[in-house]
Amino acid sequence: MNIHEHQAKALLKDYGAPVAAGVAIFSADEAEAAARSLPGPLYVVKSQIHAGGRGKGKFKELSPDAKGGVRLAKSVEDVVANAREMLGNTLVTKQTGPAGKQVNRLYIEDGADIARELYCSLLVDRGTGRVSFVVSTEGGMDIEAVAAETPDKIVTVDIDPDKGVTDADVAEISSALKLEGDAANDAKSLFPILYKAFTEKDMSLLEVNPLIVMDDGHLRVLDAKVSFDNNAAFRHEDIAQLRDLTEEDAKEIEASKHDLSYVALDGNIGCMVNGAGLAMATMDIIKLYGAEPANFLDVGGGASKEKVTAAFKIITADPNVEGILVNIFGGIMRCDVIAEGVIAAVKEVGLKVPLVVRLEGTRVKEGKAILDQSGLNVISADDLDDAAQKIVAAVKG
């Protein structure tokens, strides 16, 4: 689960991290009061969407020369003018894709005098099994570009879970970021704060880009991106309340209600598979034969008829889907349950696109018999390769 920048900063501020004063607004009418509540005279007007690259993004409805999704304002009047221009319009960045995201809220923040921009993030390093700090002196840039062009400027520091962030860890991170004076002193409290927030709130990512050294020599969290581990959501009702459904795909929201692992993609072949590994292999082979998957959908190892029905409905609700591939290898999952779920869904929502079904494993004969006797226009496949070729051929006519 992702949250907005202003929510992430409020959370980090509660832990004691240095952040600027700011106010989230949801309409342009709130902009003047928000700006007047801040020290000024420099303000930053920030689009709040779940995507990076906002500053370099462009609004669909505005001219190509218009400013991006993060703007400096030197007066209250300038804040109001920017708010009126940005709210309700669609911001397109590298991370949103061409469709972009509508800006429904802004964050009006007090400006800062920046001396240096740094990069700092925390994530779970699967290789070491530990939370790691990933830092760089090249803040304010895409970390992927830094990794590709100057990988030596990225430093990773693993944290021992039994010890937490030690003085030695702080010294190593500070050295990598070339922190001195007040900034180095601030680091002694900031890095343990970030680690505590990450672990206590079950985050999967905490990215501060940029972490700045201000002209007065102190550190400040200038931007913050936070994602949480969905598997730990039951422990954090306060975090669940921060969820913004307008930022999520409607199909993914519906899938979460049925405990389905679903991710919307840009292709035209809907996939329903049991098991994440098999789902990935299914998407790969669809691409191999010249088509694109419309989704990742794992119904799990013990799905019920109702769960399968819900999954099928979600796939058919995608207007981009021109064909559906059901690929089931029955272990715990029974093939006859899948067949019954598919039939129930088709009877309820109809079938307007080609459907290829590959079943193998537990009660496969019963599952195939159910499909054969259903009277539905189902294309049967013997194995994954056969299934992929058939659905791609059917979609291409």
Image (tube, rainbow, N blue to C red):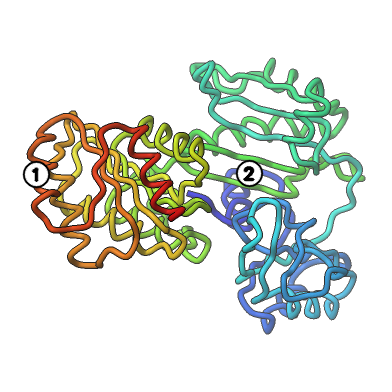
Q: Is 71 located above or below residue 16 in the figure? A: below
Which of the 4 image quadrants contains residue 240?
bottom left
In this view of the protein, can residue 239 be seen by the observer? no
The amino acid marked with disc number 1 is Ala
Eyeballing the image, is 180 above or below 335? above
The residue identified by callout 2 is 16
Give 283 or 133, whichever is nearer the viewer: 283
Nearer-N-terminus badge (2/1): 2
Q: Residue at x 12, y 49 (%)?
A: 372
Residue situated furthest bottom in the rendering:
29
The structure residue drawn at horizontal position 88% and vertical position 68%, both measured from the top left corner, is 41
Identify the secondary structure beneath mark 2. loop
> Please, what secondary structure does the residue beneath circle 1 have?
helix
Lateral position of residue 288 relative to residue 60, left or right: left
Residue 152 x %, y %: 80, 20
The residue tagged 1 is 369
Residue 299 at x, y = what percent? 28, 43
Residue type at tag 2: Gly
In the image, residue 350 lies at what x, y percent?
25, 67
Height in image: 173 above or below 63?
A: above
Q: Nearer the viewer, mark 2 or mark 1?
A: 1
For image coordinates 42% across by 54% down, the residue present is 395
Q: Is residue 224 above or below residue 288?
A: below
Q: Do labels 2 and 1 touch, CB within 8 Å?
A: no
